[in-house]
Image (cartoon, rainbow, N blue to C red):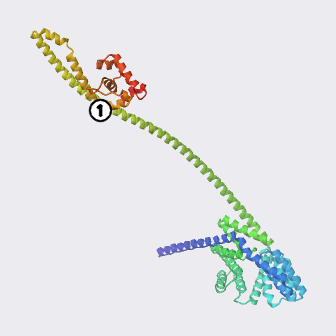
């Protein structure tokens, strides 16, 4: 059983949450619509101004006093809750015209109109005296409902502004009495009957009865925009009494929309909506609504309404200014934070850019070092290859020389032991063997070198003028080519080259000078270029 109760309680909470969320969404829509109407406030006043202009033009052309009295009433009615000063002017003219006509019923009607103007500007004493004078003259049947309405409204205002309890209660009793009077002279199906019956139910705190009365009347009748404004305002007031703020905001917003669309400048709904929204923390909307109310009250010259608005207007304005200042400080702080972030980002960008440049320079250096290393490795590999090639050839050459020397020794020994002294002498004296060996040695050198650098001769000649290019005759390499072949192998000292080739140092120097003078490139770098061939 306890588990079921818990589930029911949870379900109820969820339903309430969903309903509240739905109400907030609906209120958001109706408030957004109200905001739009306020932004286009001036648009709704244009039809009112045009209507008043038409009535004034009609008044200028009227010559019949009775028709003029009627048109003056229409103009005064058009100015009701729009411009009290203008309403007073045309109502006063209506009083003067009624007295001139001499019709008692018209005089009373004009006096009732003026009484309404008086209490709208807070002249309650004058309004009461004028109503008493009208009553003394006799209220015709067609004006009784209007008279009772003025009395009820006057006592309501007096009750609201009375600070003395017994007077307050006395005014409420009179107010209730005139409610009954209004109900007695109006048809049950009329809007006036419904609104007063509703007021009576509210006075007796029958909240649900009051709500049902207005909602049923709204559903059954095609109401004017002014009647809808009153109906929605009444519903909002009941929901406030019931503590249902969401519905109160909704109906206050609907009532305010109707007031503004009807170009009414003296109203209550928007002001009370502003107070509710202020209590809920929607300060910006509250300020916009109370400012609109204050501006309209000033345009209407509704001094009493302006006095009522002033205290709450100051409170909301101060809160709004405080909020604006807080937002300004927040925006300033946010700007400072953004500026600091941008500065940090800029510094970071500069550091990253600087680091990237350093990294790029390092990469370039590293690439250059790698290239140098590759060249060095290539040179080393080439050098190793040369060493291996020449060591192999050197060992073979040495082995051949040893064999040839041994054979030469045996040949000489044979000549010596056989007594061929003259032949031995001639053989020792002859250079044929040396020349032959040198020729063979150079041939081996040329062959070995060209195996390592097969395009050396072509590349070497490319460094020379066409007329000075060297073409070997009968040998793989000429003396000049052998000199520079040794330079290519790293032997740059002329004395060593002369010793190797069995030339004089002068001869070697002349060959090198001759080649440098015929070079197509800078002669000072000729040997260096040859070493890179």
Report helix, strand or loop for mark 1. loop
In percent of the image, x 51 and y 43: which residue is there? 352
Q: Position of residue 349 (x, y in %)?
A: 54, 45
Q: Quadrant of the C terminus?
A: top left
Instruction: In this rendered view, identify the residue nearer to me: 101 or 164.
Output: 101
Left or right: residue 523 versus residue 195 is: left
Q: What residue sits right under mark 1 in the picture?
A: 454
Q: Is residue 253 above or below residue 506?
A: below
* Whole-percent x, y for residue 466 in the image: 37, 30
Foreground pick, 228 / 452 = 452
Q: Quadrant of residue 100?
A: bottom right
- Left/right placement of residue 495 relative to residue 15 reads left
Q: State left or right for residue 442 relative to residue 376.
A: left
Q: Residue pushed farthest left?
A: 418
- Where is residue 435? Give x, y as percent: 22, 18
Q: Which quadrant holds residue 148?
A: bottom right
Q: Residue at x 72, y 61 (%)?
A: 318
């Amino acid at each position: 059983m306890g588990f079921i109760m818990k589930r029911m309680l949870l379900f109820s909470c969820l339903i309430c949450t969903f309903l509240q969320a739905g109400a907030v969404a609906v209120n958001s829509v109706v408030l957004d619509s109200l905001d739009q109407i306020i932004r286009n406030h001036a648009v709704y006043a244009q039809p009112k101004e045009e209507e008043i202009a038409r009535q004034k033009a009609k008044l200028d052309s009227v010559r019949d006093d009775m028709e003029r009295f009627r048109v003056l009433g229409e103009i005064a009615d058009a100015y009701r809750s729009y411009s009290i000063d203008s309403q007073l002017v045309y109502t006063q003219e209506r009083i003067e015209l009624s007295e001139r006509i001499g019709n008692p019923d018209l005089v009373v009607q004009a006096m009732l109109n003026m009484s309404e103007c008086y209490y709208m500007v807070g002249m309650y004493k004058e309004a009461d005296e004028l109503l008493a004078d009208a009553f003394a003259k006799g209220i015709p049947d067609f004006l009784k409902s209007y008279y009772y309405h003025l009395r009820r409204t006057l006592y309501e205002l007096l009750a609201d502004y009375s600070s003395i309890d017994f007077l307050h209660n006395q005014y409420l009793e009179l107010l209730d009495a005139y409610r009954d009077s209004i109900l007695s002279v109006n048809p049950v199906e009329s809007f006036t009957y419904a609104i007063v019956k509703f007021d009576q139910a509210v006075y007796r705190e029958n909240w649900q009865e009051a709500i049902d009365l207005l909602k049923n009347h709204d559903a059954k009748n095609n109401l004017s925009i002014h009647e809808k404004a009153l109906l929605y305002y009444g519903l909002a007031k009941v929901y406030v009494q019931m503590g249902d703020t969401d519905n109160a905001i909704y109906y206050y917003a609907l009532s305010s929309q109707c007031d503004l669309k009807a170009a009414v400048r003296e109203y209550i709904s928007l002001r009370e909506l502003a107070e509710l929204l202020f209590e809920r923390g929607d300060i910006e909307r509250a300020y916009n609504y109370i400012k609109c109310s204050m501006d309209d009250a000033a345009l209407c010259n509704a001094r009493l309404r302006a006095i009522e608005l002033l205290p709450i207007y100051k409170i909301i304005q101060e809160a709004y200014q405080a909020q604006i200042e807080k937002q300004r400080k927040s925006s300033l702080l946010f700007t400072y934070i953004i500026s600091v972030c941008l500065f940090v980002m800029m510094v970071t960008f500069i550091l990253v850019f600087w680091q990237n440049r350093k990294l790029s320079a390092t990469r370039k250096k590293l690439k250059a070092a790698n290239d140098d290393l590759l060249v060095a490795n290539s040179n080393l590999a080439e050098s190793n290859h040369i060493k291996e090639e020449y060591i192999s050839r050197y060992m073979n050459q040495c082995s051949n020389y040893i064999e040839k020397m041994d054979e030469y020794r045996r040949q000489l020994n044979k000549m010596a032991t056989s007594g061929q002294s003259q032949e031995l002498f001639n053989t020792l004296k002859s250079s044929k063997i040396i020349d032959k060996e040198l020729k063979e040695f150079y041939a081996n050198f040329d062959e070995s070198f060209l195996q390592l650098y097969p395009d050396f001769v072509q590349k070497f000649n490319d460094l020379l003028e066409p007329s000075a290019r060297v073409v070997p005759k009968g040998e793989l390499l000429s003396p000049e080519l052998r000199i520079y072949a040794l330079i290519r192998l790293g032997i740059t000292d002329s004395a060593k080259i002369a010793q190797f080739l069995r030339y004089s140092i002068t001869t070697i120097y002349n060959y090198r000078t001759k080649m440098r003078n015929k070079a197509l490139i800078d002669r000072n770098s000729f040997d260096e270029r040859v070493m890179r061939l």
